[in-house]
Amino acid sequence: MEKKIVLTGIKPTGSPHLGNYLGAIKPALSLAQDERYQALYFIADYHALTAIKEPEYFRHVCYEVAATWLALGLDPDKVIFYRQSDIPEIFELTWILACLTPKGLMNRAHAYKAAIAQNLASGISDVDSGINMGLYNYPVLMAADILLFQSDVVPVGKDQIQHIEITNDIAQGFNHTYGKVFILPRYLTREEETASLPGLDGRKMSKSYDNTIPLFVSSEKLRKLVFRIKTDSSLPTEPKNPATSPLFHIYKEFASPEQVETMQNRYYNGISWADAKQELFEILNVFLEKPRQLYNQLMTDQQKMDTLLNEGARRARSLATPFMEKIRKAIGHT
Ligand code: TRP
């Protein structure tokens, strides 16, 4: 039986954190182990261009995501791991799809609507102020990413569901006009996402709240951050409720079931917050030690990452080129 294609894009946005690991990286890596699937994971570097305009920073964040996924266990022999910008067929397909995409469909995209709403809220009379065509076309580029590789399953965060729905609309429009060429992908979101990881201040861990624990800080810095996690004012020996403690919430994601049970009892019996923090730091540090080393090594050896990503692009293109030929034929290209 042919393997099904599971594909996802990773937009480089700077310093990946513990929440990114649990929410996106870990589940994607475990899906890649599933023998029924061929995984294609790529760095959506040109998607990031809608927001990033500094070349040095752009280069840096692109390597940063590549190093992150490799350090956390992505096996480049198994997963086809590539840069979006290395696949010219994606951009050719983007144009073809754009010519079939009703403009009104893009007007309804959440990210564009949010940008307009923000302008309105700030009293800016030109609602499109500061909005570039890259942002507007973002969903079409994403549809090309997905459809070019005949993806069956696309693991994404909940905020991306609309983009997969738009991809389906665009694919159906193409198939209706030119005959059945594209298969319709489905999205895969993770249930646990609703119970997302708390950050330093107890709110959801997110770059926009500036409350994250980055994955690859030094162990000293990691300890400092863990000790900054907000706790209540209960006394050291007072019993504590693990269910409401952000410290415990993070702890249980990285500990074994036995460790979780032991720690739970220590909370009930009264553990000091300092001890709870030290235990959390230790379990995180053990987990992150090897990936941190690997990450730092990779970041000083960008050539190695280039070699891996170039090989990934070669494999990806060997899938994309024949299919692109089929698409060209379908539209009447001679
Ligand atoms: N838009 C996605 C995000 O911001 C990244 C992305 C780009 C993507 N292309 C994709 C995800 C294709 C899945 C499939 O997270």
Image: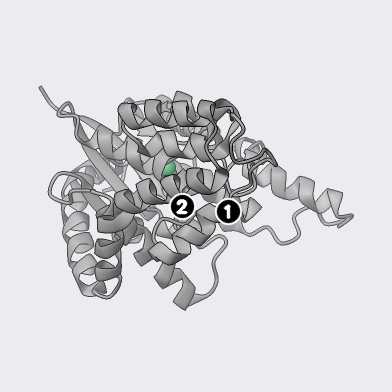
For the point 59% across and 55% down, the residue is 228
Q: Does residue 128 lie above or below 271 as drawn? A: below
The residue labelled by disc 1 is: 207
| Amino acid type of the residue tagged 2 in the rendering | His
Camera-side residue of 279 and 87: 279
CB atoms at circles 1 and 2 under 8 Å apart? yes
The residue labelled by disc 2 is: 17
- Ligand 1 shown in quarter: top left
Asked if ligand 1 lies within 8 A of label 1, the reply is no
Q: Give percent across and percent down for residue 29.
A: 28, 40
Left or right? Give the position of 50 relative to 307: right
Say what secondary structure mark 2 lies in.
Answer: loop
The picture quadrant where one finds residue 175 is top left
For the point 44% across and 58% down, the residue is 12
Camera-side residue of 33 and 148: 33
Q: Does residue 235 lie above or below 42 as drawn? A: above
The picture quadrant where one finds residue 252 is top left
| Amino acid type of the residue tagged 1 in the rendering | Lys
Camera-side residue of 183 and 302: 302
* Distance between the alpha carbons at the discs numbered 1 and 2: 8 Å
Q: Is residue 213 visible?
A: yes
Q: Give percent across and percent down for residue 40.
A: 26, 43
Left or right? Give the position of 303 relative to 333: left
Q: Is residue 173 visible?
A: no
